[in-house]
């Protein structure tokens, strides 16, 4: 019963992806209506698969006019929003060589769009004592070769979650984040040539549970954070990473036995 979102309207940014679809599916399963905002027209097919409780609204989250138009449509079709999931991202990143324009574009999509959505939805989230879930990543906490922009944007999302939680608590809005590990998704599928078994084999070295995560496994934690079951949870980051973040350099080479050799 605590997981019920009956009568609630959720907005999922970046809803055209595998992870976005899984999040929407979980929220709909709990009774919510869900607006999927995405620049990718593939979101229409996702909404169709999800059924009548889903609404796809094409939107460039980095553009204020597009955002205003999209929210007007959401309000008209689904009413006030009480749950906001900031999931959209770009992986635009060329490490050291990334030009200023790429930095600004990526931070605009990955971070600033979440702020703009929260600003525009603040009054209705407060009126319904709603919740926000931000997507950060394992990439927020460690250096990753050749990647500068994306990890910085995800670290910013972790800090944004703390700032939002602090300033929105008085309005009754809870704000938390999820930090997924490698999750079966468009980007992983592309890199692995669609070979799931290969992706799991490579992921096994980096995740204690020996495989990739499923989009649905990330979605279950988002659902929890959106629900009344998490009524005393705010400002928290939930690792959904199969143990990636607790693994130190000693995992495969225990240091004490080696010292005693
Ligand atoms: N895939 C993973 O293994 C993984 C790991 C850790 C964290 N994450 C996080 O999970 C979330 C989803 O990741 P994913 O791999 O499914 O990403 P993805 O690239 O498949 O999806 C991101 C979505 O954002 C949309 N988007 C990009 N720019 C936009 C814009 N300007 N306006 C509107 N929509 C825009 C894209 O069209 C896309 O549908 C991200 O926040 C990512 O950081 C993913």
Image (spheres, rainbow, N blue to C red):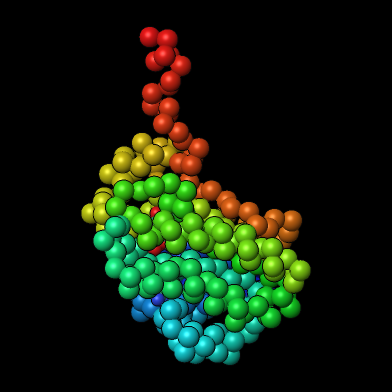
Which x, y percent locates residue 130?
A: 68, 70
Which x, y percent locates residue 94?
A: 28, 60
Image quarter hosting the N terminus: bottom right
195 vs 241, left or right, is: left
In this rendering, does residue 26 appear at all? no
In this rendering, does residue 231 appear at all? yes
Q: Nearer the viewer, residue 117 or 76?
A: 117
Which x, y percent locates residue 225?
A: 63, 59
Residue pushed farthest top? 261
Task: Residue at 29% x, 68% y: name it.
Answer: 99
53 vs 210, left or right, is: right
Residue 151 occupies quadrant: bottom left
Q: Nearer the viewer, residue 162 or 32?
A: 162
Image quarter hosting the C terminus: top left
How many labels sit on residues?
Answer: 0
Indicate whether 94 appears above or below 76: above
Q: Nearer the viewer, residue 19 or 142?
A: 142
Give the quadrant of ligand 1. Answer: bottom left
Task: Residue at 72% x, 75% y: name it.
Answer: 126
Task: Residue at 52% x, 61% y: name it.
Answer: 157
Which x, y percent locates residue 7?
A: 68, 75
Indicate whether 194 appears above or below 54: above
Task: Residue at 73% x, 66% y: name it.
Answer: 169
Residue 82 occupies quadrant: bottom right
Indicate whether 236 appears above or below 227: above
């Amino acid at each position: 019963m605590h997981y019920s979102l009956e009568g609630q309207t959720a907005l999922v940014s970046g809803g055209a992806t595998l992870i976005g679809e899984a999040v929407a599916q979980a929220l709909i399963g709990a009774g919510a209506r869900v607006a999927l905002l995405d620049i990718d027209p593939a979101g229409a097919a996702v909404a169709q698969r999800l059924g009548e409780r889903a609404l796809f609204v094409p939107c460039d989250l980095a553009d204020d006019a597009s955002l205003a138009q999209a929210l007007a449509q959401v309000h008209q079709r689904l009413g006030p929003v009480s749950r906001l999931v900031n999931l959209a991202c770009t992986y635009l990143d060329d490490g050291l060589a990334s030009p200023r324009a790429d930095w600004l574009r990526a931070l605009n999509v990955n971070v600033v769009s979440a702020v703009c959505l929260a600003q525009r939805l603040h009054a209705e989230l407060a009126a319904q004592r709603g919740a926000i879930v931000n997507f950060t990543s394992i990439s927020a906490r460690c250096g990753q070769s050749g990647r500068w922009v994306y990890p910085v944007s995800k670290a910013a999302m972790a800090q944004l979650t703390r700032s939002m939680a602090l300033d929105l608590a008085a309005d009754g809005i809870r704000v938390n984040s999820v930090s997924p590990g490698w999750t079966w998704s468009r980007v992983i599928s592309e890199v692995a040539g669609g070979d799931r078994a290969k992706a799991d084999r490579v992921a096994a070295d980096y995740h204690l549970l020996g495989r990739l995560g499923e989009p649905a496994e990330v979605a279950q934690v988002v659902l929890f954070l959106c629900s009344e079951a998490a009524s005393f949870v705010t400002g928290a980051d939930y690792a959904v990473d199969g143990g990636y973040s607790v693994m130190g350099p000693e995992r495969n080479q225990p240091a004490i036995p080696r010292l005693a050799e």
